[in-house]
Image (spheres, rainbow, N blue to C red):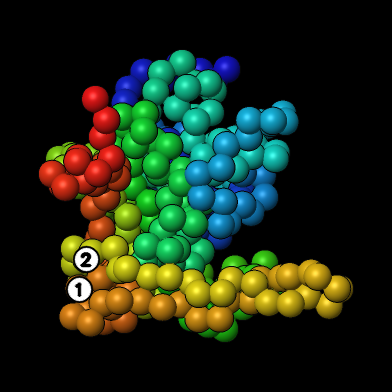
Amino acid sequence: MAEEAAAPWILVTNDDGVDSPALVPLLRCLAAIAPVQTVVPAGERSWASKVLTRFGQLQARRLPREQFEVWAVEGGYPADCANLGLYTLFPSPPALVVSGVNVGTNTGLAYFLSSGTVGAAIEGALAGVPALAFSVELKAEEYTRWRQHRDAGASALWHHAAEVAGQITAEVWRGGLPAGAALLNVNMPAGVTRQSPRRFAALTPSCYGAFFGRGQAPDSFIYGLSGLRTDDPEGRGDIAALGRGEVALTPIRLALDAPPLAADLQRFEQA
């Protein structure tokens, strides 16, 4: 067990793993706000949504990342890491959960629901702890280099993204989340700086379309996204905000049920 936290503290997690180029810059900024504890997957666990390891065993070990000590969870998903940080590894729960900064964006409903970064933040929100999910856009060539070679590059981007994430986190630390929100989803454009405009934006309605293409083996299929489809003709969503070079702030509620109409009550209910 870790030593007892004497003051309110921040739990940091991500889905890109312990070697994420965004991790240490973020920790530097957050450590200026409050004590920080970090629990992250040992390797990348993107696109994991809110998967929890019910069957199997997790192994958590402490590793140094520059001046910070980080818990790396072998076999763990982002939501596993958040849950361990909320309930198990430390003697007191965090006052805030910060997930990210994700390498790549989590804009639009389809990506939002698939994101491990968001999944970890939801785990915090379900525990009643305010949560933030941060993501940053990369230029196409930078993202390809990261995916293919694990080459971080773009060091200025991680610094600027961490700075903006730190400023927004500090505001939530002081005054709480936006009214009615369980978590705040934040997406930053590739050229983000402290001076980038910040705007509230809706979660863009979106759909993947076909997610798989034919593999080489018979009856096999591999990832082959055919193109994201969106429905935002007035440009009010987070995808459009990023296209304008804005930091998109999207407050999220976890109330998913739809109130039934009187006609629905007659159709479905039974005394």
Front residue of 13/253: it is 253
Circles 2 and 1: CB distance less than 8 Å?
yes
Image-based side of 200 in relation to 58, left or right: left
Front residue of 64/244: it is 244
Q: Percent from the top left, x then y, of residue 42? A: 66, 44
Image-based side of 77 in relation to 271, left or right: right
Crowdedness near tag 1: few (<14), some (14–19) or many (≥20) residues, C-alpha within 10 Å = some
**Res. 61 in view:** yes
Image-based side of 202 in relation to 41, left or right: left
Q: What residue appears at the point 72 percent right and 31 percent down from the top-left corner?
A: 56
The quadrant where residue 189 appears: bottom left
Amino acid type assigned to the residue bearing label 2 in the image: Ala
Q: What residue appears at the point 36 percent right and 66 percent down from the top-left corner?
A: 108
Check disc 1 and report the residue beneath it. 236
The quadrant where residue 219 appears: bottom right
Q: What residue appears at the point 18 percent right and 80 percent down from the top-left corner?
A: 234
In the image, residue 174 above or below residue 136? above
Q: Percent from the top left, x then y, of residue 214? A: 74, 77
Q: Quadrant of the C terminus?
A: top left
Amino acid type assigned to the residue bearing label 1 in the image: Arg
**Mark linked to residue 201:** 2
Q: CA distance from mark 2 to mark 1?
A: 6 Å
